[in-house]
Amino acid sequence: MADFKSKRKKMVQEQLASRDIKDRRVLEAFLTVPREEFVPEDQKDFAYEDFPLSIGLGQTISQPYMVALMTQALQVKPGERILEIGTGSGYQSAILKELGAEVYTIERLETLYLQAKEVFLKLGYNIHMKLGDGSKGWQEFSPFDKVIITAAVYKIPDPVAEQLSLGGIAVLPQGGVVFQTLVVLYKSEEGFSEKQICGCVFVPLIGKYGFKQ
């Protein structure tokens, strides 16, 4: 059986800490969350490699470095309410939970929703989940301190922008269907200011305020 704990440690040292992931709390979260639990059985041996993996239904679990980069940019503080759009495998949700956030995550594909729910239950993560169109956000529990979108959008969906608190931060891949730029948005009374991080490739966010299917 693969030694996942040593692979996890190697991943954190070689893929994250040796690059530009310097937030100690983020690194600790990646040392703690068992990534192998969030990938399909036939992919477990590759769980800690430096590339994305298919989780079925045309969806992927992002490479560890991209998850870490987005997490670090979000500047998570314990107790913050964070909206995640695109649960996918559930790995990003678990990382946010390890950082002490109150996580609200939305997934449109029922199969992935149920799989992630099962893993959360197995690992003891108390995460708020919703099956539905993530581009509409989650009005019932807004406003949120932070927002993370793990699928490509041409811009932050209007309802999600409204549900983010003043002073809040959103991290998302912004652009077209094929290629995007990872950006950090900072919300103030004047609107949003933007910081670009790097180029990236994510599957598109399908929904009323996202891309059409």
Image: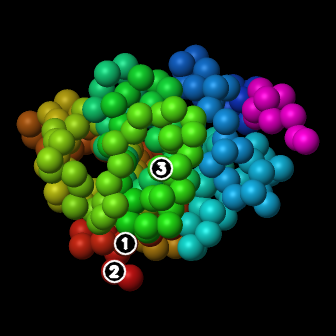
For the residue pair 63 and 41, the one nearer the viewer reads as 41
> Of 37 and 78, which appears nearest the observer?
37
Mark 2 vs mark 1: which is more N-terminal? 1
Of labels 2 and 3, earlier in sequence is 3
Residue 7 inside the magenta-drawn segment:
yes
Q: Disc 2 to disc 3, how far (Cα)?
A: 26 Å
Select label 1 or label 3 by which is in front: 3
* Residue 198 in view here: no
Drawn side of residue 16 relative to residue 45, left or right? left
Q: Residues within 10 Å of mark 2 (few under 14, many from 20)?
A: few
Location of mark 1 (residue): 206
Which quadrant would the N terminus be assigned to in this image? top right
Q: Is residue 41 visible?
A: yes
- The quarter of the picture where the C terminus appears is bottom left
Tell me where the magenta segment starts and ends, as one range. Answer: 1-11
Query: What's the residue at 79%, 29% (across, down)?
Result: 5
Instruction: Find out whether the residues at labels 2 and 1 contact each other: C-beta distance under 8 Å.
Output: yes
Please tell me which residue is depicted at 71% across the width and 44% down the height of the picture.
36
Q: CA distance from mark 1 to mark 3?
A: 21 Å
For badge 3, the amino acid type reads: Lys
**In the image, what residue type sits under mark 1?**
Ile
Main SS, magenta residues: helix
Q: Give the answer, above or below, for where 116 lies relative to 123.
A: below
Which residue is under mark 2?
Answer: 212
Q: Which residue is mark 3?
A: 117
